[in-house]
């Protein structure tokens, strides 16, 4: 095998498999070798499923030999966050409480990936219960940013970001309650897509917050994310939130370009926010100019209720507390000190608080719906700043500044994607974010691809020679 699999995006791996330039077994072995070589430093995997992955790769190759190819994920090695169930494989959620938990059934998205012919390499590290803080110690460290291993990749889908960005898998699944797909993707130079709420099932996925949780892809390219979404989207009788799911062929419209799309720039709340990193702001504004050059029109828009969106998001953490209530009472020592008080904060919200949050959410929704009567998509920077060193990560408080850019869109359940748009002076990735109408994930991905197609940020790779401590 002459090619270096780790340099390819998922599409490159898929095409190589389709041409039979490489077999699924060869690709799987290459990724497993790279994990063995580098993950002692990067710490992206909790469990490597080597034997199972090779068995599925052999089965995929056998199907290919018979002339059957299930689709673009056939034989492609990917990995999934360790709160997504794979039958017979431990699922820890990054917690000592679940250190030996082994589910008996696959999650819905796991079954969909297997049905699409994908090979799952293993389970990826994460912030504890998808709500903890970065950790470099203990049984479940949360991963190191491959652009600078002394920096955090953000959370909570930290391992998913690290593995995909470092070429330790062809793509990954993460989960996003307040930004846990988009934040780590922004910090590691990936495309991170939070699908419309209810488009992708959460059955078999451990909960942070039922009303806000999403499962989505984290990849090196927009095509890659569209291919994964195409495989995992759809209604699931075991997740009632998916009853209205309206999946599409996300690859079919991907090359439609930006021409004619009306883009609402949320300037006051995001672009002009004084705490926004200057390099992020400059890169985002340059990206918007690129989209304008591709035929999109830009319109300054505003949703005043963005100012209170975090006040509406926070009371939903009562759901997080309810999920953990019994374990907090009987096994509090099972939680890291940095997580326990954050979960307990959920107990402080009253029923009246929750009802007020619901009213605020609906007010916010009406404002954004009104914007979508005049624009097709909303655009703004992906995050507040590039990745920070572990020692500088805010370890106190409920909501770091980065949640300002992501959590409001969980509240509304709208599709949102981040796509890399540059690098800071220190060589750290930055991104823009695109938000669309409910179930219009195809247009969100289309615009992301239109930007990606005329830029090269997504082709840059971190240097393995720097993966030392």
Image (cartoon, rainbow, N blue to C red):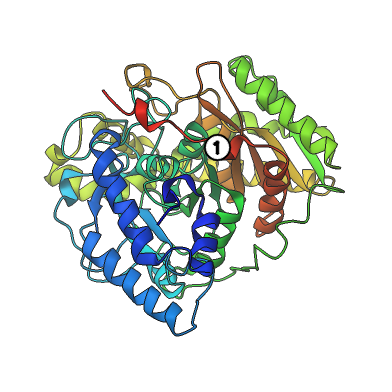
Please give left or right for residue 444 compared with residue 229 in the image: right
Residue 328 in the image: state x and y as whole percent.
19, 43
Residue 361 in the image: state x and y as whole percent.
60, 44
Indicate the quadrant where residue 351 lies. top left
Q: Is residue 59 above or below residue 336?
A: below
Q: Mark 1 sits on what residue?
A: 406
Image quarter in which the C terminus is found = top left
Q: Is residue 458 above or below residue 402?
A: below
Number of numbered discs present?
1
Can the viewer see residue 196?
Answer: no
Q: Nearer the viewer, residue 166 or 97?
A: 166
Residue 67 in the image: state x and y as whole percent.
49, 83
Q: Nearer the viewer, residue 136 or 370?
A: 136
Residue drawn at point x = 40 percent, y = 32 percent: 153
Q: Is residue 25 above or below residue 357?
A: below
Image quarter in which the N terminus is found = bottom left
Residue drawn at point x = 32 percent, y = 29 percent: 467
């Amino acid at each position: 095998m002459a090619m270096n699999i780790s340099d390819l995006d998922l599409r490159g791996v898929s095409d190589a498999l389709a041409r039979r330039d490489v077999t699924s077994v060869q690709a799987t072995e290459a990724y497993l070798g790279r994990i063995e070589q580098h993950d002692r430093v990067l710490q992206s995997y909790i469990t490597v499923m080597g034997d199972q992955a090779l068995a599925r790769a052999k089965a995929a190759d056998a199907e290919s030999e018979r002339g059957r190819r299930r689709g673009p994920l056939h034989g492609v090695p990917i990995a999934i966050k360790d709160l997504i169930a794979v039958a017979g494989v431990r699922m820890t959620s990054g917690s000592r409480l679940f250190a030996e938990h082994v589910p008996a059934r696959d999650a819905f998205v796991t079954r969909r990936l297997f049905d699409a012919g994908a090979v799952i390499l293993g389970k990826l590290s994460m912030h504890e219960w998808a709500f903890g803080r970065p950790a470099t110690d203990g049984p479940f460290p949360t991963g190191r940013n491959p652009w600078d291993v002394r920096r955090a990749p953000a959370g909570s889908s930290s391992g998913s970001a690290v593995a995909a960005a470092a070429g330790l898998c062809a793509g990954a699944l993460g989960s996003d309650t307040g930004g846990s797909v988009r934040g780590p993707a922004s910090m590691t130079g990936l495309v991170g897509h939070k699908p419309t709420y209810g488009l992708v099932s959460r059955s078999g996925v451990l909960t942070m917050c039922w009303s806000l949780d999403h499962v989505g892809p984290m990849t090196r390219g927009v095509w890659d994310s569209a291919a994964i979404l195409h495989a995992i989207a759809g209604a699931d009788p075991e997740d009632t939130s998916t009853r209205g799911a309206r999946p599409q062929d996300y690859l079919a419209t991907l090359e439609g370009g930006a021409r004619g799309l009306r883009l609402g720039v949320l300037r006051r709340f995001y672009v002009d926010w004084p705490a926004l990193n200057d390099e992020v702001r400059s890169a985002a504004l340059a990206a918007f100019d690129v989209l304008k050059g591709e035929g999109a029109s830009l319109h300054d828009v505003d949703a005043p209720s963005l100012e209170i969106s975090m006040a509406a998001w926070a009371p939903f953490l009562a759901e997080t507390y309810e999920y953990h209530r019994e374990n907090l009472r009987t096994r509090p020592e099972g939680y890291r000190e940095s997580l326990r008080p954050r979960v307990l904060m959920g107990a402080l919200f009253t029923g009246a608080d929750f009802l007020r949050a619901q009213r605020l959410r609906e007010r916010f929704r009406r404002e954004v719906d009104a914007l979508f009567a005049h624009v097709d998509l909303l655009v703004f920077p992906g995050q507040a700043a590039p990745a920070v060193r572990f020692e500088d990560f805010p370890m106190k408080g409920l909501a770091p500044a980065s949640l300002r850019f992501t959590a409001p869109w969980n509240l509304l359940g709208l599709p949102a994607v981040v796509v890399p748009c540059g690098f800071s002076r220190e060589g750290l990735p930055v991104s823009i974010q695109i938000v669309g109408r409910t179930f219009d994930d195809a247009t969100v991905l289309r615009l992301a691809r239109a930007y990606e197609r005329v830029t090269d940020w997504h082709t840059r790779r971190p240097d393995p020679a720097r993966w030392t401590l």
